[in-house]
Amino acid sequence: MSSKKSRRQFLAQSSLTLLAAAAVPSLTEAQNPPANSTPGMPPAFGTAPAAGPEVTTSDFAGAEKLLQAPLTEADRAQAAGNWRNAMAPLYERRTGPRKLPIPSTIQPYSTIHSILPGQPTGPAANKFIRSTTDPGPLPASDHEIAFSSVTRLSRWIETRKLTSERLTKIYLDRIQQFNPKLNCIITLTADHALDQARKADAEIASGHYRGPLHGIPWGAKDLLDTANIPTTYGAEPFRDRIPTADATVTQRLNDAGAVLIAKLSLGALALNDIWFGGQTMNPWLLEEGSSGSSAGPGSATAAGLVAFAIGSETGGSIVSPSMRCGITGLRPTYGRVPRTGAMTLCWSLDKLGPMARSVEDTMLVLNAVTGPDNHDVACIPSHLDFDASASVEGLRIGYFPLWMKEAPATPVDSAALAAAARLGMKPVEVAIPDWPYDNLDLILFAEAAAAFEEITLNHQLDTLKAQVPDAWPNTFRQSRFLSAVDFVQADRLRRMVALEMARIMSQVDLLLVPSLRDEMLTITNFTGHPSLTFRAGFVEVTEARSDWAPDPNHPLPKFASPRRVPHGITLIGRLFDEGTIARAGLALERSFNVAAEPPPGF
């Protein structure tokens, strides 16, 4: 028998698989090897036992339409001929016989680092200097107290002009009064909050003041684990889920003495603003949703139901509700804040960040939650350099000239750029290549579908309230047909984009961009750059706005008279340089002088 024939017989008949280790042979087997094996013969691709259903050339022809990767007739015949031996066995982890569930705590082996080789890693040391402005006398009305910034509230609590218990009761009363209109609370933690508030007051009275968040009531987007308190992800399959441990961010806020008052709504599994309890509404315009997926944090913070909230962002979920609800949202650099104990949507994109009513408030919260926890593999050591009194004179503020002249930009954006120049910042024109940035979303969809594979395959996903074509159920199912090759190519495009952003950020200290400019939302979420969105003025709208694709059967409400709503701008910073965008934001916020106005009726 020729060696060539022997190898072919081996490849055709051997049950050896490429990915499974062979069992240790018995002594008899070792002494009497199978007649069709040849010593030293390596394993080969395409030689596993047949698995899965029969596959025909017509199956490939149909799949080619989905992938837009046409094959010739001969290519198709060859691919179908050994699919069951070559590719179908690679699904064994999911299809069996050796099914292997992957625990939700397991992160991908490949990790994303926002800092590229040779790039600076942010500030060289920690520095945090908050403002020393006198908060003034405690207001007489509960309403004014409720809408005060954390910066002012913390000074009143520190000096014992205001107790945490009183402040907590103010917010609890407001939740009872206004949540029926907003639908922004999933779980109210009233007893827990009052216990924490009384503890905070006792500690402060004894001289043990933990810092600016001590005694401050806050709300958590309901994807952040809270021990023995439901964490539902806003989704039907998880509505009875009660974690046994706190997320790292929850624990750090507990350690800072903050008071958890509510678990806030999010669009189911972190998409838009519809959850199992309905839609969360915008307090500035009750005919529209608050945007998402940090819907509850946006709505509750804007309506004065909490002092601040923790939101999350994968592709716009802090920026968009901050814009619509007229609050301040800080999306930190990817890798600054640990996500341990938070729902995973996309390992390489998810970020946790503060949402509040002023720029400095977000930095007070970021300072409490920043830094690695030795569990989130994407979280890396970094420093936070913030000085509320630092000058903005000479800061180079980049902008895209064309973007300032077309939607979604408004006169508010142009006015903000002019204000930056008046404050001594130096506007610098920048440009970026015209690339298909939305193609990066292939990574988002693939990771998200992997994160929720189990409830997709067992059809629990079918119980979600939103089942329209642009909701997660359809997207997760579609994502199983994305190409693995295109996933890798999208990842390579991601590096190209990161290099372009590194080039731009070497020319400026920060960027000013229209908040909902799709390219920049996509680019900076994939490159990990920090983003600060805050109210800069007001615009008028004649139609309600929505995160959802237009539905002719459910048109959005139109208004006979234009409605006045807040409009925000977004500053993009260098990686791990949140301090610069915060001090620029502080200067602009003071210049605009529009942040304090509450929504009518609240």
Image (tube, rainbow, N blue to C red):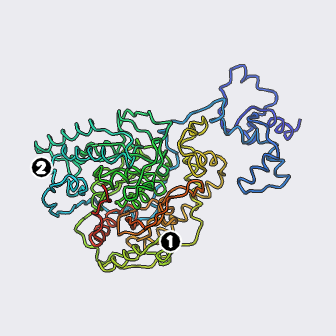
Query: How would you rate the neighbour count of disc 1 (Cα within 10 Å): few for under 14, some for 14-19, many for 20 or more?
Result: few
> Circle 2 is placed at which residue position?
160
Q: Quadrant of the N terminus?
A: top right
Residue 208 located left or right of residue 505: left
Q: Which percent across, then down, holds residue 263?
A: 36, 42
Quarter of the picture holding the C terminus:
bottom left
Can you say whether 416 is above or below 105 in the image?
Answer: below
Q: Which of 439 and 335 lies nearest the eye of the viewer?
A: 439
For the residues labelled 1 and 2, the Cα–Cα distance comes to 48 Å
Amino acid type, callout 2: Arg
Between residues 48 and 538, which one lies in front from this camera angle? Answer: 538
Depth check: give the residue in front, 494 or 176.
176
- For label 1, the residue is 407
Residue that extends furthest to the right in the rendered view of this protein? 1
Tell us which disc is closer to us: 1 or 2: 1
Point out the tag, 1 or 2, that comes first from the N-terminus.
2
Residue 573 in view in this figure: no
Residue 506: image quadrant is bottom left
**In the rendered structure, which amino acid carries the disc numbered 1?**
Ala
Q: Is residue 161 above or below residue 523?
A: above
Say which element carries label 2. loop
Q: Which residue is at the front of the view, 365 or 75?
A: 365
Quick check: 19 left or right of 417?
Answer: right
Q: Name the spot of residue 381 as percent of width and height, x first.
A: 36, 53
